[in-house]
Each structure stands twice: as structure tokens, then as C-alpha cells.
Image (cartoon, rainbow, N blue to C red):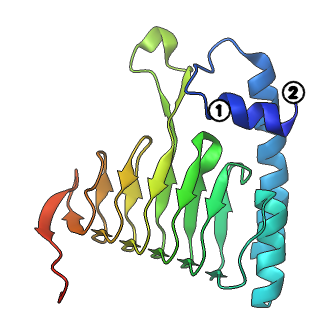
């Protein structure tokens, strides 16, 4: 299985259970991601060098407006799409095998976790992996230590408060916070 086939399958919503070829590809991609993030996190790099490493990690062009403060961690990289003028602060951990899309102008705070994989609640099938993408809209701000779970869409202009655990979609131009995250307020144009 090549990367294109893997990404098509992971983005199809089909079950990963009983697919050893998927597991082998996940393992290979995670090893490559470990190598590249170790390179990224192991010493100082200029912004240009960081973008070059991120391009190798994602397999996609990274806009020159992108900015990242290492360390950064991911288990795949190849199912991560990053828009323009995106900033990732230090300590972010992305589990992107299920797909992560980050819109233009998004700000991601310290130690944010984006988790696209889950496991079955049925103990007999606990090892089964269930994947669902995370979509982050334009001009979203995710505060430090927030966690966004599989299948969540965060609407344009939304804010996720520090420490929140986001389990459901976030409407655009709202502020959510808490565990689990709930709407705190709607953002007005002058806020």
C-alpha cells in the first residue's frame, strides 16, 4: 500500500479493523514522522528550515507565512493540511492519521492535542481503530492545553478556551470552554 492509497482509505471513513496492510502503513509512516520530528525538535532551525522539514513531514507545500515554535509532534504528518498565516506554538501534538485540516489564520496554543483516532468501547473490539477528521476553520484560536477529539469541526472565527476538551462541533464565531467544551458566548464584530 502506498501513501496515496493509505490516505484515500483513511479519509473514506471505513473501519481499519482486520486490515493488516493499513497497520503496516501506519507503522511505517509513524516511524518516518518520529525521525522527522526528532530532526525538527533536536536543535535550532530557522523559520525557512522549519518549513522545509514540515514540507517533508506533510508531503505538501507549506506557505512561507507559516510559523511554528518547536517542539512539535505528530504520528503521521501525511494527513495534515495547513493553510496560510497559521501559527503553532510549542508542544503541540497532532494525531493526524484520521486527517487534520487547519484553515488560514489559525492560531494554535501551547500543548494543544488534536486526536483523530479512537478505539471501540466494546472490550472485544478495543484494539479496533476508529478514525474521523478534525477540521479547523479560518481565524480560529485554540488556547493552550486544549484537546480536540476525532470528528470535530471548529467553525471560522471560533475560540477554544485554554484547557478545553472539545468533543462536538464548534459553531463559527463562538467561544467554547470547559470539559467537555460548551458555548460560552457568541463573538460580536467589535469583540
Task: Judge left or right: residue 24 versus residue 99.
Answer: right
**Which image quadrant for residue 11?**
top right
Residue matched to label 2: 1
- The residue located at (80%, 67%) in the rendering is 55
**Which image quadrant for residue 143?**
bottom left
Image marks 2 and 1: residues in contact by CB distance under 8 Å: no
- The residue located at (48%, 58%) in the rendering is 113
Name of the residue lying farthest toward the left: 185
Quarter of the picture containing the C terminus is: bottom left
Residue 107, percent across and down?
A: 46, 77
**Which image quadrant for residue 62?**
bottom right
Q: Is residue 157 visible?
A: yes
Identify the disc placed on residue 10: 1
Residue 159, percent across and down?
A: 30, 71
Residue 142, percent across and down?
A: 38, 70
Relative to 179, does residue 145 appear above or below in the rendering? below
Name of the residue lying farthest toward the front: 189
Amino acid at each position: 500500500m502506498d501513501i496515496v492509497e493509505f490516505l484515500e482509505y483513511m479519509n473514506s471513513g471505513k473501519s481499519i479493523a482486520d486490515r493488516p496492510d493499513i497497520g503496516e502503513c501506519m507503522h511505517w509512516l509513524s516511524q518516518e514522522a518520529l525521525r522527522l520530528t526528532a530532526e525538527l525538535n533536536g536543535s535550532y532551525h530557522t523559520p525557512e528550515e522549519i518549513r522545509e522539514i514540515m514540507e517533508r513531514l506533510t508531503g505538501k507545500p507549506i506557505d512561507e507565512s507559516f510559523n511554528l515554535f518547536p517542539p512539535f509532534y505528530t504520528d503521521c504528518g501525511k494527513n495534515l493540511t495547513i493553510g496560510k498565516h497559521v501559527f503553532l506554538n510549542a508542544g503541540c501534538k497532532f494525531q493526524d492519521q484520521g486527517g487534520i485540516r487547519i484553515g488560514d489564520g489559525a492560531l494554535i496554543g501551547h500543548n494543544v492535542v488534536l486526536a483523530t483516532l479512537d478505539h471501540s468501547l466494546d472490550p472485544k473490539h478495543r484494539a479496533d481503530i476508529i478514525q474521523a477528521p478534525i477540521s479547523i476553520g479560518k481565524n480560529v484560536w485554540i488556547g493552550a492545553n486544549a484537546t480536540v477529539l476525532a470528528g470535530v469541526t471548529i467553525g471560522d472565527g471560533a475560540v477554544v478556551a485554554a484547557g478545553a476538551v472539545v468533543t462536538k462541533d464548534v459553531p463559527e464565531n463562538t467561544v467554547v470552554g470547559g470539559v467537555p467544551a460548551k458555548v460560552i458566548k457568541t463573538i460580536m464584530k467589535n469583540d
